[in-house]
Image (cartoon, coloured by chain):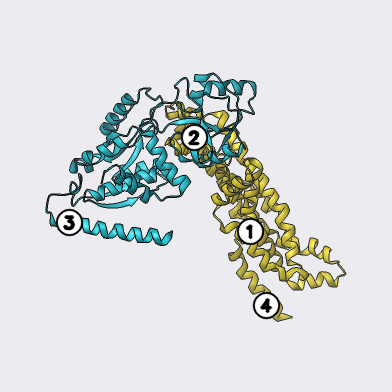
Chain colours: A yellow, B cyan
Amino acid sequence: MTTVIGASEQAQKLDPAATGVEGRPDARSTAGIFLTPTVLILALIALYFYVQSQTLDSIEARFVNQKILTTTTIEHIQLAALSTLLVIILAIPLGVVLTRPAMRRATPFALAFVNIGQAVPSIGVIVLLGLTLGYGFRYAIIALVLYSFLPVLRNTMVGLQRVDRALIDAGRGMGMTRSLVLTKVELPLAVPVMMAGIRTALIINVGTATLATYTDAGGLGDIIDAGLTNSRTVILITGAVLVGVLALTIDWLASLAERVLRPKGL
Amino acid sequence: MRVGTRACTRRVVVLAALAVLAASCGGDESNSANSGMLKGASFTVGSKEFTEQKILCEITAQALEAAGATVKRQCGLTGSATVRTALTSGRIDMYWEYTGTGWITHLKNTRPIPDSGQQYQAVAKDDLAKNKIKWLDPAPFDNTYAIGVRKDFMPELKTISDYAALVKSDPNKGSLCVATEFTGRDDGLPGLEKAYGFSGEKTSTLKDGAIYDSVKKGSPCNFGEVFTTDGRIEGLGLRVLQDDKKFFPIYNPALNVRNDVFAKNPRLADVFEPIAKALDTKTMQKLNSDADNQGDTPKQIAEDFLKDKGLI
């Protein structure tokens, strides 16, 4: 018994680095909560003054205006949020199923399959789906789901696998059913690792959604592409800063959610 | 077939070797108009990523080689801005640019000049003064925007005015595929709508290469923004609506050379003057079509073109 606990302790010491979860001290992260939004607001203010200082020509004015920027930002948030939500709905149950003892043999095959989705370059996934299935919002969402499936699935599995066997045995010994052990012991203990995976998926989706512009799905990629093809720096910088701010804002919100969802005392 | 081609290639190589021998035996006198004109010079030739540009890149490279220069190829750089930066920063020495792109994208103007000759003069003058880029003589072929549609789709539609009328009566049937660049330019969609007095057509923004296929399928749109010399218009059974109000400006391409390179090798102008002259719209469409529809390589197409016209 002692050897088992020793091994799992060692595993817990090793795992955080491997899965991207850090046990941050609370005081430091409280300061961090305010740091990110401050920096982001400053970035937006800087962008505003930069754009104000420029005389926009007719091409620039067609993209750098409130109406277009609001529409594309909303489209971008919809692309990233909906695709991440779908990934959560699909990948977490799959991760749970694949870690059940009966399914362990299927694990390597499932992982290999999901790996393909992420190994293919994102522009390939998006444009290929556009060419074969069709263009528009719906198909961009499918591409994003394929692309960000792996981190959520992988972290769900790792999170569940690294739960101390002794705790599961204890739960079973107390007379809990398998599903009770899953919901009351395993999943809560796996939350930090799973959240790290979801955060990764969110960031991937915010970034990759810029490519959705090539398949008629809108988003801030419209702005970036317009800046590139027309060789207009103002448009390019506006699009790039907005995507950056959006990605960091979403990551910041996810970090807040992580604090709330993390079980007390972990 | 393949064996035949290989044997043929070998024969060409042998002939070329003989030609080199003959040329070197003959001393300074040469058997081709341009050979030796640029002896000892070395150039890096660039181009954008689409078919026409790759062919122009090969034509340029082979013409330079025939004139005795050493050539490094950077054909197929992605995006106008990338190639342009490569030129201004000295990573490439020359590439073919279109007067419209030079005027609007690189020189940051918004209004095109309707007359193609004046447009060329203006862009050549400004680019040399501001950025030290020399525009050699333009080719007569016109690669501008056009509205493309499937050949068998509403054959009674002949002109863009007819299209504008269709959009007014049925915006969904008049659905239009465009690339982002086209939606922002005065000589693109905003100006087109103004000139022909239509609006509200259902638009889909796609990567420009995907537009041709979408128009052929009729999904997500029946009409699309195309480029007049693209080989896929013919290859996919598309046709171009007549620009009856002459809205789209004529955009001729010309070889852009960094001026310090040109100053050292002024005979570049002599080498490329006859080549530019030979590139009319029909010829360019044919060369593009050979690549897009027959699958010939740009290298082969360039070689055939230069030899057929007696340019190398």
Kindly indicate whether the residue at mark 1 contacts the one at mark 4 (C-beta within 8 angstroms): no
As measured in the structure, the alpha-carbon distance from the residue carrying label 1 to the one carrying label 3 is 64 Å
| x then y, percent, for residue A141 | 65, 46
Label disc, if present, on residue B22 of the rendered structure: 3
Kindly indicate whether the residue at mark 1 contacts the one at mark 2 (C-beta within 8 angstroms): no
For marks 4 and 1, give the one nearer the viewer.
Answer: 1
Residue B94, by quadrant, is: top left
| x then y, percent, for residue A253 | 64, 47
Give the side of residue B142 with respect to residue A122, left or right: left
Q: Which amino acid lies under the numbered mark 1 shown in the image of this protein?
A: Leu
Q: Earlier in the sequence, mark 3 or mark 2?
A: 3
Q: Which amino acid lies under the numbered mark 2 shown in the image of this protein?
A: Val
Secondary structure under the numbered disc 4 in the rendered image: helix
Asked if badge 4 and badge 3 are on a common chain, one would say no
Parent chain of label 1: A
Kindly indicate whether the residue at mark 3 contacts the one at mark 1 (C-beta within 8 angstroms): no
Asked if badge 2 and badge 1 are on a common chain, one would say no
Please tell me whether residue A195 is drawn above or below residue B302 in the rendered image.
Answer: below
Q: Is residue B50 visible?
A: no
Q: Which residue is mark 1?
A: A150
Q: What crowding class fits label 3: few (fewer than 14 Cα within 10 Å), some (14-19), or many (20 or more)?
A: few
As measured in the structure, the alpha-carbon distance from the residue carrying label 2 to the one carrying label 4 is 68 Å
Q: Which residue is mark 2?
A: B226
| x then y, percent, for residue B38 | 19, 47
Q: Which residue is mark 4?
A: A6
As measured in the structure, the alpha-carbon distance from the residue carrying label 2 to the one carrying label 1 is 38 Å
Kindly indicate whether the residue at mark 2 contacts the one at mark 3 (C-beta within 8 angstroms): no
Asked if badge 2 and badge 4 are on a common chain, one would say no
For marks 4 and 3, give the one nearer the viewer.
Answer: 3
Secondary structure under the numbered disc 1 in the rendered image: helix
